Amino acid sequence: MSVAAPLLLALHSSSDVLGLGLASLATPDPLSPQQPPRITSHPLGRRLSNDLLGCVEQLLPARRWRELGRLAVATGPGGFTGTRLTVVFARTLAQQLALPLDGFSSFLLMAHRLSQRGEVGEEPFWLLQELPRRGMVAGRYGMDAWALGGMAEREAPRLYGQLGDLPPGGDRLEALVDPEADVAQLLRLSGLAAAAGAAAPWASVLPIYPTGPVAAGPR
């Protein structure tokens, strides 16, 4: 009797829409057309704290969580509360089930998505997210054959006062979350990490808070 391959669960809440993904770890690429993933999106907004668990259970009931072999979560930058909720949930689940947990920046997921769609070239580029009355969050990305999935985060997302504060060089693109497409990238990167045998301790996965409640400027 064959045993089903363990599952990979991905969570992304760096925008007002919760994105979830479930894929098999049977192949190095969880997006394989032979075993397509299940990806769902839920425009929860402020209801995330009440509805997160219910949305996860719609995708994978709690009685089947023992079938999981790995978890992945988007670490932000994003809304303070939304990002924290999914990261804490993923960390708790990974700890209780003794599972590896991958954390990837939401900006890095966007960079991979833009690259796969041919919307960026081989030169490094910036992703920018403007904030009302607070400046902008920006991170710099570029192709790198040695990086997981071929894309490297050259400058981690951080808060800048204005556009002129960014170091020169590279195109500057608006950072826009595409919930389902970015969850697909989250599944892909975590699947590649699993295939490479990469360690993924849950305790090292933390949310990115460049605009936390007490942040006052660049750090």
Image (cartoon, rainbow, N blue to C red):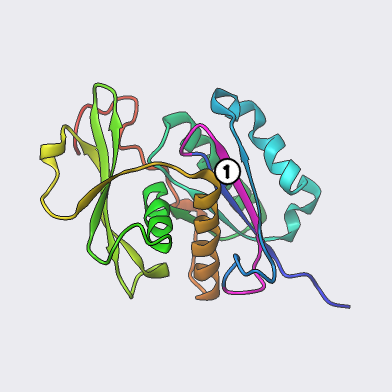
Q: In the image as oriented, which residue stretches furthest toward the front? A: 118
Residue 40 vs 204, above or below: the answer is above
- 35 on left or right of 185: right
Residue sticking out furthest to the top = 133
The amino acid type, in three-letter code, at marker 1 is Gly
Closer-to-camera residue (187/88)? 187
Q: Quadrant of the C terminus?
A: top left
In the image, taking residue 78 as reference, residue 35 lies left or right, namely right
Image coordinates of residue 21 in percent, x first then y, are: 62, 52
Residue 178 location (% of width, % of height):
48, 45
Q: Position of 45 compared to 155: left or right?
A: right
Q: Nearer the viewer, residue 201 or 171?
A: 171
Q: Residues within 10 Å of mark 1 (few under 14, many from 20)?
A: many
Looking at the image, the residue that sits furthest to the right is: 1
Percent across and percent down for residue 146 are 33, 75
To which residue does mark 1 refer?
Answer: 19
* Circle 1 SS class: strand
Is the residue 46 above or below the residue 24 in the image? above
Q: Quadrant of residue 50?
A: top right
Q: Which residues are magenta?
A: 14-28
Does the stretch in magenta take in 191?
no
Which residue does the image show at 19% across and 31% down from the upper left? 217
Q: Residue at x 50, y 75 (%)?
A: 196
Residue 41 or residue 203, whichever sits in front: 41
x, y percentage for residue 88?
53, 40
Q: Is residue 6 left or right of residue 86?
A: right
